[in-house]
Amino acid sequence: MRAWALVRPERRVWWRMVLALVAGVAASGSAVALLATSAWLITTAAAQPPVLILLVPIVAVRAFGVGRGVFRYVERLAGHDAAYRVLGETRARITGRLERIAPAGLSGRRQGDLLARLVLDVDAVLDLWLRVLLPVAVAMVTAAATVALLALLLPTAGAAVAVAVLIACTVVPWLTAQTAARAERRLAGERGDVAAAATETLLTAGDIVAFNAVDDVLASFSASDARLAAAERRSAWSAGLGGALLVLCVGGASIAGLVLGSTANITGAVFAVLVLTPLALADVLGGIPAAAQLAIRVRAALGRVQELVDAPEPVREPASAVALPRGRDLEVKHLRVGYGDDDVLDGLSLDMPAGSRVVITGASGSGKSTLAAVLLRFLEPRGGEVLLDGVDLASLEGDQVRSVVGLLTQESHVFDTTIRENLLLAHPGASDLRLWRALYLARLGVFVEGLPDGLDTMVGEHGARLSGGERQRLAFARLLLANRDVLVLDEPTEHLDEETGRALLEDLFEAAGRRTVVLLTHRPELAPAHALRQSVRLT
Amino acid sequence: MKPLDPRLLRRAKAARAFLAASVLIGIASGVLIIVQAVLLAKGIAGAVLHGEDVTGVAWALAAVVAGRAALMWVQEVVAQRAAAAVKSTLRRQVLEHALKLGPVWLSGERSSALTTLLTKGLDDLDPYFARYLPQLVLAATVPAGVVGWMATGDLIAAGTVVLTLPLIPIFMALIGWATQAHSRRRQQALDVLAHHFTDVVTGLPTLKLFGRAKAQEDAVRRVTDRHRVASMSSLRVAFLSSFALELLASISVALVAVGVGLRLIEGHLGLQTALMVLILAPEAYLPLRQVGMHFHASADGVAAGEEVFRVLETPLPERGERTDVPDLRSNTLQLFDVTVRYPGRSEPALDGFDLEVRPGEVVALSGASGAGKSTVLAVLLGFVVPERGVVVVGGSAADEFDPKVWRRQFAWVPQRPGLRMGTVADNVRLGRPAASDDDVRLALLAAGAGEVELDKAVGERGQLLSGGQQRRVALARALITEAPVLLLDEPTAGLDAEAEATVVAGLRATGRTVLMVAHRPALIAAADRNVVVGNRELVPA
């Protein structure tokens, strides 16, 4: 699995995994040993020997009885601790990787879907370690140890149990995974049909009810639903084969012990151990089918994560960056840029001297956001160049470029924390005075002052407690605080109504002062008239 | 939903059959477990004490093992089939009930939540049927049988099991109750973590803008670590529940084994009985332990079931049954003092609204957005039941009539028409299923969509048509009906002035009564009357 690099534990976590494994083996081993010693104890006791001989086994039986619970507890704790550490590390690795890809490398629809599932998919790491790898490893080690013990007592019986264990550890999971995967494949189509029918019916409920078509629609839904149910019933026949095979393996091992042991030259107590110990394996190996089934889902989830982080990096950082030039004149020359096989912009040239106001208009899809991405060095041009004071952006590091060029988009991300923290992001350590100055410049000062908690007001998830206009103004205040010399405004009024949008743009241009402002919009009419002097249209 | 919810059994016949089958399989499993124990004990004791041949016993055992494997397989097959049938039944019932509750009940988040429930949510019932319920049945059948059989051989051992067995659920309940706060706190810690991760990942572009993204890798590591420590401390307590379970079960088995051993030495017990007791003792605890194990796996399914019953138990509004709806071609439609309040809102969506629409009139409804214009149409269609006021036709209140028959008086063009997968003609025929191709073509023409091909696929949610085309297809769908009253929600949005004029002229030509929500002055001017919704004055056009 290529995803291994993402989900692999660090060295200091490994020993916790090993601890969990050892404790797990001790727990499962205790269960096996409990039955084995009990069998020995009882069969020996039947010969009515002096009680003293049995003292050690009696103590052992009790110890194993206590041991199973205690060791299992240790296994659980150590395993969860390790798995949570791996989860944290995996999340951190993904963050580091996405940092290099975002945002231009994640803008496709497929990437959008993957990103939406990312958090849930990454949680599969927990399943991988806690419900697949750890239990399977524990089962295998314990079973191997049991086989070794039985082989010591009677090699032929040991061999027979070994065969049973081998089947349980290979054929059973394979069969379970195979049947589950096949059912999944077979059902996918029918499941999709039912989902589509249900979604459509609920979305068009009004139309259906108004036109008295409820019965027809339900009938056609029932038809596709019945097809799904029938397919599910058909695939039911192969489910449970793995579990059944496991029962056969364990039972067979026990019978083998009975037959082989009865003719061997061993004591009655050893004979009882040979017959009864395999029974304890049922519990030890019982988790394997479920783990195999889960492994399929884990693999799919981690595969999606892998696909996401495998997206190519949209920008090549220079091997050694040149120093940031002092001038702030921007010049776009014969720019060609795009995603995948398509060029979004080809041959675009623009001149944006320091302090200028440029309005770039164009319908959606004409490449406005692509241009913004290039100006911020989120995206590498395919041809032509962008010059900052005569220096090609490609010879600068992204962070250097973004210390000069700032961006306000249609959906500025506001973090689920306080207004203060959201602002400080742009300028760590800034004084409250500076924060307020930025808020007032963005015309949000009065609003924040009116909030009971002021700067410490929580803004909610994605800034949900703010209106769209307030959110944009907060983002703008943040941008002002960051003190960038070039401001790129990419459809900043897209989700606002006309009046709010017009007021926001008016304030943006005024607060920008001597900075360069590049406004990308499909609604140039909202921009203040004086800004429209230099206007470029993308097609 | 309770572990075994009677509502589930009542709603789904397949669940009842499954439960019955599971009980049979459970009993059979219990019997085979006992037979296997007896055979093993007999084989061992016979060989050890009397040097008997084990061949016969071995064959019998092989048969028993094969039987247990077969039962295991059958149980799984039965469970999967039952799950398929129950899911199917519930899906249909939920969808039908949701449609009966109507589009207004369905609006907003509920629709998407219900979609998730119908698609992914119900599949969570699979582990509930395949693992949890069978184990529950086994837990109810096997221990009783096993202990009963043990009692025939060794009363003391059986007594030990009988005394310790009930301790398991008691301890689990006690510990579960005591650790509830802890597990809640842990869940919260995990949620905070996942939320932080999402926030960082979606905010990466912003963080990058301010040169703060590179620090996030470590920030995620740090935050995760902090919460891991918190969540581990509650796990230490939460795992006590399963710890107690394991410990009780295995200590009890150890107690039984040692006790049996000591009684053997004293000669109170035979070897065969002792072995039988030893083999059976763990089997008494196994089902209970597994119920505990599978409980968590089935939690999502239980939650989905809960959700299903929440929908199914939402009462349907009471509706009349009269079918003699007066014809609106000759009767006036009147609304008196109609007030509608949507659940969870304090302000009424429509407040004391009066309206009179005479046959053949074209009436415009205008007013600020949110004033309740669309709500007026929803009331007429019976999608919402007014809190106060009444709709009257020919001296009878609308709610006396069977809603299906009542709705035949109206054809509706919603603000956002819901087109269904299929062709343009399929969608138009929703208005009149028996319509001929020529009828469909005429309707499209009247709706200003003469250029749209009849067999053009509309795609998912009408995506293959432009917004304007979708509206016009929806208009054609309304025009093709024989309903005397057209209810139009901004029928000309997205059309240019010329197309709008064509549509309005087409509407007039039909001679039908029209009640339309209108924003644009041109459309309002084209009506006979304009009624402003939101304040109670009637403005003659």
Image (spheres, grey):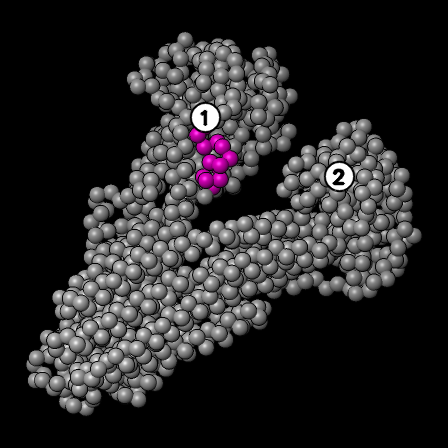
Q: Which residues are magenta?
A: A104-116
Q: Residue at x 64, y 38 (%)?
A: B463
Seen in the picture, residue B461 relative to B240 is either above or below; the reply is above
Q: Quadrant of the C terminus of chain B?
A: top right
Say whether residue A481 is left or right of residue B276.
right
Which label sits on residue A192? none
Please tell me which residue lies in front, A96 or A400: A96
Seen in the picture, residue A6 relative to A60 is either above or below; the reply is above
Badge 1 element = helix
Give the residue at mark 2. B454
Give the residue at mark 1. A479
- Residue extending furthest bottom? B268
Estimate the x, y position of residue A252 in percent, counting from the top left.
28, 70
- Residue extending furthest top? A390
Crowd around label 1: few <14 · some 14–19 · many ≥20 (10 Å): many
- Residue extending furthest right? B330
Q: Residue at x 32, y 14 (%)?
A: A322
Estimate the x, y position of residue A466 in percent, counting from the top left.
53, 38
Specify the amino acid type for callout 1: Leu
